[in-house]
Every structure is written in structure tokens, then in C-alpha cells.
Image (cartoon, helix red, strand yellow):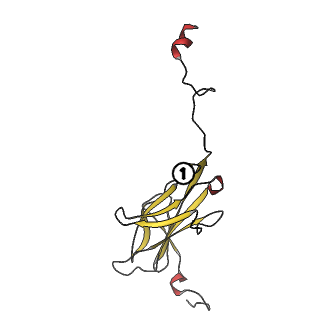
Amino acid sequence: MSLGKGQDPKASVAIKKRSRVPGVMITQYVEQLPLGKSTPDFTRKPLATTVQEGKKGLFKAMVSGDPAPTVTWERKNGEVTDPEKYNTRFDERAQEHILEVLRVTPDQADTYKCLVTNEFGQAVCTATLKVMEAGFKKSNTANGQEPNFRSMLKKT
């Protein structure tokens, strides 16, 4: 197989693999994995979350792969590079890669993508962030008070 100029030889194949974790897409870049090496994968993928406006949103991922993969985060409609709005870190103790959405605003409600990459492949999954407006309260009745069932029963 001949490669064109500027093509990455590792990316000459793209084998789609199934992860043990539902919703994760793995692409293997090599025909045959060397003994003891593996494509990246998620051992725990980030989950969809709903956060109140002004609070901190967190996406956490645990990953595997040999050699150890790098983890990057993307957003469908925007960037996650602004340090005033986003922070990425690795929690050594919990072995979690974390994307923090600092002081969440309604415009940050979006689909976020976690990419886990090493020289043998890439694993990708997405999670959504929903934002609740500040001051929003769940209530059972229009006036926000619990219904009084005894008075309702007396009416019958």
C-alpha cells in the first residue's frame, strides 16, 4: 500500500472496534497490535449531567491503553480552551481525567466529546451538559406547596 505525501503511516488503516463500554467508538490505526500493547479505551466514560447555572459541571473519564493514552476534550459548538471557563486535570488518586466547567452558563449547554489517543488508536465518546436556570425549583403544585391530601379527602 503506497502512502501519499504528508500521510501518517500509522493512520494507513482504520479498523473500527467495539468497546466493552456502550457508546464508545474505537478506531485502531494498525493492522496488528504488537504483543502486550492495546488501543485506548474507556474503563468509565463521562456521563451526561445537569447543572444549575453558576455551579461547577464535571465530566469524569477513566481510561486504559498501552502505551498510556492522552486525553483531550472538545465541545460540539465551541472551544474548551478558555481557562476562565474550563479546567482539565488528572486526579492521581482516583485515576480520573476530569473536565471542569467552571461557573456554568446557559450557553455552555452542549455535547462534549472525550478523545483518548495513543499511537495504536483512538477511543471517542460524548456526554451532554444541560443547564438549569438559577432559581428554578421543582414543585408538585402551582404555588410550590405540597398538596394537603386530608383536605382533598374531606371534599369528597
Residue count near mark 1 (Cα–Cα under 10 Å), binned few <14, some 14–19, many ≥20: some
User: Residue at point 60% right, 40% down?
Assistant: 135
The part of the image, by quadrant, that contains residue 90 is bottom left
Q: Is residue 28 above or below residue 88?
A: below
Q: Which part of the image, by quadrant, shows the N terminus?
A: bottom right
Asked whether 107 or 31 is in front, the reply is 107
Asked whether 59 or 123 is in front, the reply is 59
Q: Which amino acid does label 1 sit on?
A: Lys
User: Residue at point 52% right, 55% down?
Assistant: 57
Q: In this view, does 11 lie above or below 59?
A: below
Q: Where is residue 25 in the image (x, y as percent from the top left)?
A: 51, 65
User: Residue at point 57% right, 31% down?
Assistant: 139
Q: Which part of the image, by quadrant, shows the C terminus?
A: top right
Look at the numbered disc 1 and give the secondary structure of its residue.
loop
Q: Where is residue 48 in the image (x, y as percent from the top left)?
A: 53, 53
User: Residue at point 53% right, 87% down?
Assistant: 9
How many numbered marks are there? 1
Q: Where is residue 93 in the image (x, y as percent from the top left)?
A: 34, 63
Residue occupied by mark 1: 55
